[in-house]
Image (tube, rainbow, N blue to C red):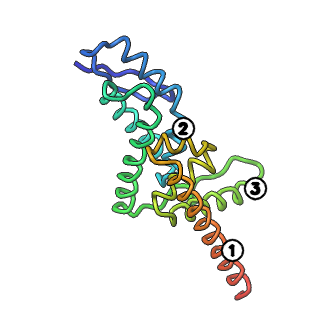
Amino acid sequence: MRQARLAPEGIAIRTDETVEPARDDLRLRRLVDGHYDFVWRSLRRLGVLGGDVDDATQRVFLIAARRLGDVRPEAERSFLFQSAVRVAADSRRTQRRRHEVPADEAGDRPDPSPNAEELLDARQARRELDRVLDSLPMELRLVFTLFELEELTMAEIATLLELPQGTVASRLRRARESFRDEVARAQSRRKSGKNDR
């Protein structure tokens, strides 16, 4: 028998009542409370469109709820991140099939902020960051986003991704090089586009 439980942000999570329900409910609650923001940001940075991030986050915690008994307490964050990677990959495949324009790119929503120019600059910078991150191979993107954006240490990343620290360092170096190269190409394209006018 399954029962819906409410998590932060109104997310309904189902738990299996047959396996120590009180302890599992408490553990799941702690998992959601402690890692919700990290999972949400990770999914966004792994290419899930803005309108789909909440649903993808819920899918990660649904997976965690179903597999709670299999997840070692010291490996919860790693389990959630690896689940987020798989959910993000599924979401990107679905996005490619739908051929939808992201809502933040469609521009059909009025912006209530009084300083529209700053918001436009921030939105363009966000789009450019997403485009540059999309250009990185996933193995480099994971390490780059965890180190540069989530500000985890290399040791934490190695534990999270279950990789040797040397591999993490190598991937981070390659990711930074690729990131810099892609940013330089984008700046060059912008300059040449302005000179053509």
Residue at screen point 56% across, 47% down: 146
Along the line of sight, which residue is nearer the eye, 22 or 121?
22
For label 2, the SS is helix
Residue at screen point 28% across, 21% down: 16
Left or right side of 194 for 172 = left
Residue with the mark numbered 1: 187
Label 1 and label 2: CA atoms lie apart by: 30 Å
Residue with the mark numbered 3: 118
Residue with the mark numbered 2: 38
114 in relation to 101, above or below: above
177 in relation to 170, above or below: below
Crowd rating for badge 3 (residues with CA inside 10 Å; few <14, some 14–19, many 20+): few
Label 3 and label 1: CA atoms lie apart by: 19 Å
Q: Amino acid at mark 2?
A: Phe
Residue at screen point 43% across, 32% down: 75
Crowd rating for badge 2 (residues with CA inside 10 Å; few <14, some 14–19, many 20+): some
Question: Residue 9, how many percent across, how many down?
Answer: 51, 29
Left or right side of 117 for 88 = left
Query: Which numbered disc, 3 or 1, marks the residue closer to the eye?
Result: 1
Q: Amino acid at mark 1?
A: Gln
For label 3, the SS is helix
Picture quadrant of residue 130: bottom right
Along the line of sight, which residue is nearer the eye, 196 or 66?
66
Q: Are marks 3 and 2 in contact (CB under 8 Å)?
A: no
Question: Residue 138, how many percent across, how many down?
Answer: 45, 58
Quarter placement of the N terminus: top left
